[in-house]
Image (cartoon, rainbow, N blue to C red):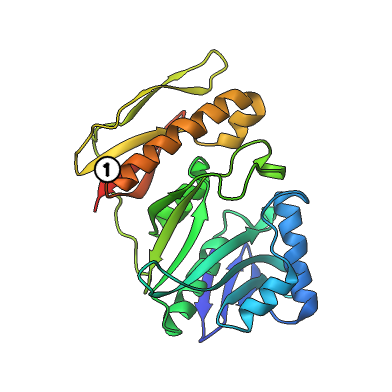
Amino acid sequence: MTSATATDGVEVMTVDGEELTLRRVTGVDEYRQCETLQADVWGADDIARVPLLDMVTAQDNGGFVLGAYRPDNRLVGFVYSFPGLTGEGVLKQCSVVLAVAPQYRRHGVGYRLKRLQARLAGIAGFAAITWTVDPLAGRNAVFNLNKLGAVGTDYIVNAYGIGMGLNAGLETDRLVVTWTLPAGDPGPRPGGNVPMVNQIAMSRRGLPVPVGHTFDHRAQTIGMRVPWDIYEISRNDRGLAMAWREVTRCLFQHYLGQGYRAVGVVRMPDHCRYLLRAS
């Protein structure tokens, strides 16, 4: 069970009877805990590693490094962002990392950290928060698009080079998502029967395989089938994971370039479906 209360810059939430305090990270020891948590979550070799120097600099210059702390001041989650500008010159926060210790996941800690980030950014005058996600990691896509209400607006090919750690061996394509402030209730996601831009089949090993796609749909809302977990596929069949990266790269680039935006994700038994809506 999770509950939460808030004051100006601090929020208190309860997870299974334990009180967590959400607030700004302060002091070298707390930033070191952020470094350690990143290594614990993604592995020592993964690209998702933000050092103390960057976090301190951002915190002191308009950014936000917000942590979730147990009563003994042990860090169990944090979010990090720094100020930036949109392509139109509008002030935004560039969010880089959200990490939560495994035993505290699925209790709303990440969600509460992002909501606190949005609240403080809005108070400070920022118009939006942007960040990137792997479009083939379904759980993250559901969190960012469905739960937070962010929208996928752009696509970056191999943003950080060939991955290591969790991303081992795969090109690090990323979907850019934009969260407009103030962040309200995301509301219902579009659903129902929509035309699909691609087809899949199941392999003998029970893995989804891309078998065809089209660039010709023009409906207001369209769907794109993608794997739920590209990393699980990669562990079983690296070539199939690479094929998924290539075909979805082409589809995202085309339809986002035509003015569509990724507005939601629907979980299916053996894959998930992005919902893309014409803007």
Residue 106 visible here: yes
Which corner quadrant of the image does residue 31 belong to? bottom right
Question: In the picture provided, is 29 more to the left or to the right than 19?
Answer: right
Question: In the picture provided, is 222 more to the left or to the right than 158?
Answer: left
Residue at (47% x, 18% y) in the render? 202
Kind of element beneath mark 1:
loop
- Give the x, y percent position of residue 124: 46, 84
* Image quadrant in which the C terminus is located: bottom left
Estimate how packed mark 1 is, as few (under 14), some (14 to 19) or many (20 or more) residues with alpha carbons within 10 Å. Answer: few
Q: Residue at the bottom extreme?
A: 8
Residue at (38% x, 42% y) in the render? 253
Residue at (51% x, 16% y) in the render? 203
Residue with the mark numbered 1:
191
Which of 259/38 is in front?
259
Residue at (76% x, 68% y) in the render? 33
For badge 1, the amino acid type reads Gly
* Image quadrant in which the N terminus is located: bottom right
In this picture, is 38 found above or below 23? above
Which corner quadrant of the image does residue 90 belong to? bottom left
Which of 152/103 is in front?
152
In this picture, is 106 found above or below 114? above
Question: In the picture provided, is 58 more to the left or to the right than 176?
Answer: right
Query: How many labels were placed on the picture?
Result: 1
- Give the x, y percent position of residue 155: 44, 48
Which corner quadrant of the image does residue 199 belong to? top left
Residue 24 visible here: no
- Give the x, y percent position of residue 164: 71, 43
In this picture, is 82 found above or below 232? below
Which of 201/214 is in front?
214
- Give the x, y percent position of residue 64: 58, 76
